[in-house]
Amino acid sequence: MDNTLNQAEVEKIEHDLLNHITHRKKVHNIWLGFLLLVIAIGIFAYYRQLRYGLIVTSMRDYTSWGVYISNFVFFVAISLVGSLVSSILKLSKAEWSTPLTRLSEVIAIASIICAAIIIIVDMGRPDRFINVLIYGRIQSPIIWDVIIIATYLGLSVLLLYTSLIPDLAICRDKLTTVPKWQQKLYRILAMNWKGTPKQNAILLQISTILSITIIPVAFAIHTVTSWLFSTTWRPGWDSTNLGPYFVSGALMAGAAVIVIAMYFLRKSLFLKEYITLSHFDNMGKLLVLLSLVYLYFNINEYLGPAFKMVGVEGEHITELFTGKYAAMYWLVQIGGLILPIVVLIFKKARTPFPLMVVSFMVILGAWFKRYIIVIPSLQHPYLPIQDVDESYLHYIPSWEEWAITLASFGGVLFIITLLLRLFPLIPISETIHEKSAKNSAS
């Protein structure tokens, strides 16, 4: 620890950043109770799905991937925020991102866990998931997805844990009023951390290796997900652009999620001194940059098919541009992509509340974008089945599907809330070090 900060200043930082663990408000318990209720309703809906089969959903032979797979792709996208903030920005020496690294890692872990769960929910027979592991073939993109998701989850957990170790030692030494089981948890996880130069050097080396390793894995997870689409013979999916298209959209959605989390946690946990207006301004600029990149890949994705308008591809494009999905498509493109770029160019829009509202627009656009990617393509097969039932030609999710979808969002928020109740939201040791460095420089 740098001596340029006196003991009182260090204790103030520790108190501020541990306060949400020691002083829990009643509203936080109400929030957890609400999330558990949402999850319980989803579990009941899933029980009905297990008991009666996938017939309780609106998925049929045409639309065999419904809102579940849209949700899966969305959560995989959000999980990319972990590598964006905690690795890319950290390795590029963007010190302003320090208060956001742990938050991004927690969001990444919660998202990838629920992405994996939603895939099992999508299976009519979840017990057959074991067959994927036993009989999985390397020729199948499905097994690639299983491997890359498991790898990314493992690396994300390690990245979060290694960054937590110095703060776990602070929790072990300072949080003497928390329950005994919690104190024991901190003692075990702190692994006898003393903050010696040797320990710091080892931890820095491990963290750097993990930060570098997780970047290609994070890019691979969304690229592999895009391959699940591009290797399937459906209109709108036969594109080599899908890999970077998915990755760029994921980075944009992840940045928007961080902004929303920043806004609400800053207010509810009284962290205005640590998550400042400068952080919102920088995240707003980053969101504009990522949105512009995604806009470029959107143009690439639709320009070719729209220019040729051949066969079923033409029917698919017509349905998106002027057909029954046109309202959703243009709302996504304008409200969730173009409008945020235009608004965030202005500095006043990059303040907390306006930026949070714009980020909500981006997130809603991102979710509906995944819906548009999945559903319309499935309803226009190259080889349609003859004389199908009318229900095959339309897809409106059943209440069970919506309940399970909302429960998956509740699961993400529940995991995030639980982790933030146990561990410091903002890295304490890094904050002390950076403030010491600034004092030394001045």
Image (cartoon, rainbow, N blue to C red):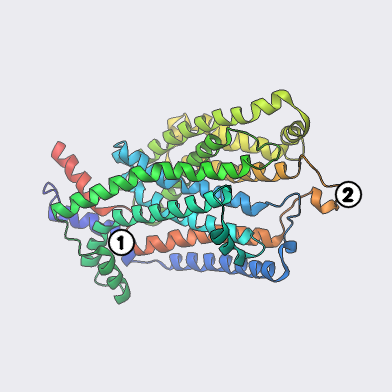
Between the C-alphas of marks 2 and 1, the distance is 64 Å
Q: Is residue 230 above or below residue 423?
A: above
Image location of residue 41, percent across then percent down = 62, 68
| Front in this rendered view, residue 381 or 231 | 231
Q: Earlier in the sequence, mark 2 or mark 1?
A: 1
What is the crowding at mark 1: few (fewer than 14 residues within 10 Å), some, or many (at least 20)? some
Return the residue at label 2.
387
Q: Is residue 332 visible?
A: yes
- Residue at the limit of the structure toward the top, as seen here: 307
The residue to which callout 1 is attached is 19
As helix, strand or loop, the secondary structure at mark 2 comes to: loop
Residue shown at the point (76%, 39%) measured from the top left? 382
Q: The C terminus appears in which quarter of the rendering?
A: top left
Q: Is residue 15 left or right of residue 370?
A: left
The spot of residue 251 in percent (x, y) is 48, 40
Identify residue type, mark 2. Answer: Asp
* Residue drawn at point x = 22 percent, y = 44 percent: 434
